[in-house]
């Protein structure tokens, strides 16, 4: 068999295949639900209800989507320039560490100044963390996939060391957790008494800014050119390595904001279970969004809905909530296949 | 001085070879895939799936070797999926690989939960036992380390020999290597690049799964979450470190495992002065350092990560 590019995929085709991907994902999930001895339709209904069936459910979904928007943006930006940043998890944790270091009373600043200062420091830390693998890629040819993946483990151990050492809360009853951030370093809740916080607004703003950078600036154009064909970009006079550096700084900074937003907006302190893999899920979010920054917001809410809904369903129907992870991974694989099928025709012989 | 004495203990080398065994299987698996031109980032998840598949077979009353075979089959299934998406479909090997890791890991955890809904502590099986080889196992230090291991460890060494022999001494191996260097030339010989690459990814993934199964069936006796713990990613570094050659990769795996066994003992020796996390970071840091050190000399298979379409130049 061979693939032939389609000259102009019709509108029907561009809709048909991605819809097919979603149907296929639910078909896989239905099989798993049957294997767990439950009825797929009632389980899907419970997932939908748990994700969007009430004000509480909807707010919970948006709360869960917030870190995924940041990590999804980080991945979308990096993958667009074909910088394979699989280290959003580590950058998230570094952002959380910086938030704790600066937000627990070290800086005597009022909230309107303190929060932007912390955010800038957080972004700088995340940016620097990804700059390492980017430099290793451009000057030594070391594959950034492996280095960013390995850094995830190193950074998590580093955080564990801090939480049992210098950052340990003396009042924490021996648990490895940090002190809580002071009131001035907290992001306000959007609705009093609910968990949704100002981090969601920052995430939306970040998506818009990222979209502008990608679509309307010279840097965005260069990043897309480098991602499309580095050799051609170099030939056209684009400084490929410098573009990759800038991409790394932007991507790392965005991922680190996820850690800031989770600590300053939701949790208040840092523990080792701050992120249940938000960095890795960000890859799925970015791919589902076809690497479009505004699409990331929608994809993050969709993925968060599956997670939140599955948690609620798992409590009542007894199907393990890991089904959410399976669905998200399946959606990633079916969606990239669907995109290929909209662009190419398979010729058997 | 004590820090040096560790290197002379037989128990240290026994541990080093034991730690190396799963890495050897998985590194050979990745090496085969990459030699054929496919980067397989599904490795971490496929190891988890293999670890569970092998263990649960034995837990359900199966024979240990049946467990190994089931693990290999499960690995090959994920390899089939990875291969289909990356070889004929030509999708991004990075994205598909990460997707396979997420899928294999989550499917494994889901299956664990529906198979054993009630358990709080992981149940145990009777794992492979050491099988001393007569005479050879009595050689001081070396004998215990190399010839008093479980049958799966011996299989790991046999695998390296077989992989090296096939790759360098058979027409099939030649075709695999050429598929990763110059696929058009393979096609010109009338051999299908697609089938060669698909086969390599399936066999490679089966080996990764056996590497995972080693953990639950030989090194330990139960399955728990997060047990692969980055070993798959380390194997990808080991393939680069070994310059895509089975013998060098084997050496790398043993060196790495010796270092890992050493840091555990050094950790006990320093008695908590240095935070234990520093020691646990070392294997990952060492992998990155090895990549940097080898980078100048690394000669990637030329068609690695390049999808091949028949009739294209």
Image (cartoon, rainbow, N blue to C red):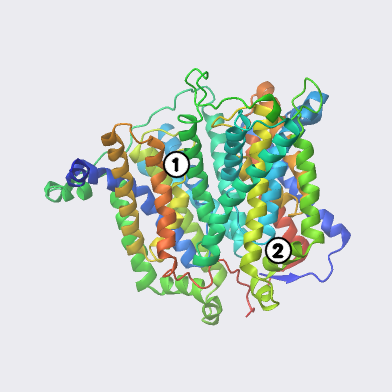
Number of marks drawn: 2
- Mark 2 or 1: the one toward you: 2
The quarter of the rendered structure image containing the N terminus of chain A is bottom right
Left or right of B297: which side holds A82? right
* Percent of width and height locating residue B102: 58, 45
Instruction: Assign a secondary structure to mark 1.
Output: helix
The residue nearer to you, when weighing B194 against A175, is A175
> Dot 1 corresponds to which residue?
B51
Query: Residue under mark 2: which chain is it in?
Result: A
* Percent of width and height locating residue A260: 66, 37
* Percent of width and height locating residue A274: 59, 32
Instruction: Assign a secondary structure to mark 2.
Output: helix
Disc assigned to residue A223: 2
* Residue at (60% x, 71% y) in the render: B308
How many angstroms separate mark 2 from mark 1 (CA)? 40 Å
Left or right of B138: which side holds B226? right
């Amino acid at each position: 068999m061979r693939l032939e590019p389609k000259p102009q995929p019709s509108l029907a085709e561009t809709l048909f295949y991605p819809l097919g991907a979603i149907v296929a994902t639910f078909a896989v999930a239905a099989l798993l639900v049957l294997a767990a001895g439950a009825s797929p339709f009632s389980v899907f209904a419970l997932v939908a209800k748990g994700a969007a069936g009430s004000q509480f459910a909807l707010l919970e979904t948006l709360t869960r989507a917030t870190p995924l928007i940041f990590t999804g943006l980080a991945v979308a930006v990096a993958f667009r320039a074909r910088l394979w940043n699989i280290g959003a998890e580590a950058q998230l944790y570094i952002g959380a560490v910086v938030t704790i270091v600066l937000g627990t009373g070290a800086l005597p600043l009022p909230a309107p100044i303190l929060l932007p200062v912390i955010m800038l420091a957080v972004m700088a830390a995340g940016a620097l963390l990804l700059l390492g693998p980017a430099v290793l890629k451009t000057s030594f040819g070391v594959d950034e996939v492996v280095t960013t993946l390995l850094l995830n483990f190193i950074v998590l151990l580093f955080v564990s060391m801090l939480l049992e050492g210098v950052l340990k809360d003396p009042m924490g009853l021996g648990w490895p957790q940090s002190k809580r951030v002071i009131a001035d370093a907290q992001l306000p809740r959007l609705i009093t008494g609910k968990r949704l916080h100002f981090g969601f607004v920052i995430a939306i703003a970040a998506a818009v800014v990222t979209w502008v950078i990608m679509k309307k600036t010279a840097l965005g154009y260069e990043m897309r050119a480098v991602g499309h064909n580095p050799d051609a970009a170099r030939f056209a006079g684009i400084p490929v390595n410098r573009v990759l550096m800038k991409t790394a700084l932007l991507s790392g900074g965005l991922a680190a904001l996820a850690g800031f937003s989770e600590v300053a907006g939701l949790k208040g302190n840092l523990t080792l279970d701050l992120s249940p893999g938000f960095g890795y899920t960000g890859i799925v979010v970015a791919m589902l969004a076809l690497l479009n920054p505004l699409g990331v917001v929608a994809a993050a809410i969709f993925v968060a809905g599956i997670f939140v809904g599955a948690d609620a369903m798992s409590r009542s129907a007894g199907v393990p909530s890991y089904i959410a992870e399976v669905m998200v991974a399946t959606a990633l694989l079916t969606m990239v296949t669907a995109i290929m099928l909209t662009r190419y025709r398979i010729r058997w012989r | 001085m004590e820090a040096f004495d560790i290197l002379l203990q037989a128990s240290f080398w026994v541990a080093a070879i034991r730690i190396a065994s799963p890495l050897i299987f998985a590194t050979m698996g990745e090496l085969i895939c990459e030699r054929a031109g496919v980067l397989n980032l599904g490795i971490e998840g496929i190891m988890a799936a293999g670890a569970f598949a092998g263990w649960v077979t034995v837990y359900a009353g199966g024979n240990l070797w049946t467990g190994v075979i089931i693990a290999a089959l499960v690995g090959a299934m994920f390899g089939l999926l990875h291969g289909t998406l990356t070889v004929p479909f030509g999708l991004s090997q990075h994205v598909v690989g990460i997707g396979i890791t997420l899928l294999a890991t989550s499917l494994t955890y889901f299956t664990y939960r529906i198979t054993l809904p009630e358990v709080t502590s992981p149940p145990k099986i009777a794992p492979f036992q050491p099988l001393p080889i007569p005479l050879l196992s009595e050689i001081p230090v070396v004998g215990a380390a190399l010839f008093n291991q479980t049958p799966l460890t011996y299989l790991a060494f046999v695998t390296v020999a077989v992989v090296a022999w096939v790759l360098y001494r058979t027409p099939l191996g030649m075709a695999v290597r050429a598929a990763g260097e110059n696929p058009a030339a393979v096609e010109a010989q009338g051999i299908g690049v697609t089938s060669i690459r698909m086969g390599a990814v399936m066999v490679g993934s089966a080996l990764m799964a056996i590497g995972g199964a080693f953990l639950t069936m030989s090194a330990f006796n139960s399955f728990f979450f997060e047990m692969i713990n980055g070993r798959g990613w380390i194997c990808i570094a080991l393939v680069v470190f070994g310059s895509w050659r089975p013998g060098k990769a084997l050496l790398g795996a043993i060196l790495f495992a010796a270092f890992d066994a050493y840091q555990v003992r050094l950790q006990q020796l320093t008695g908590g002065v240095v935070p234990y996390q520093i020691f646990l970071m070392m294997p990952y840091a060492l992998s990155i350092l090895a990549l940097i050190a080898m980078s100048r000399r690394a000669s990637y298979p030329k068609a690695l990560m390049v999808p091949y379409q028949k009739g294209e130049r």
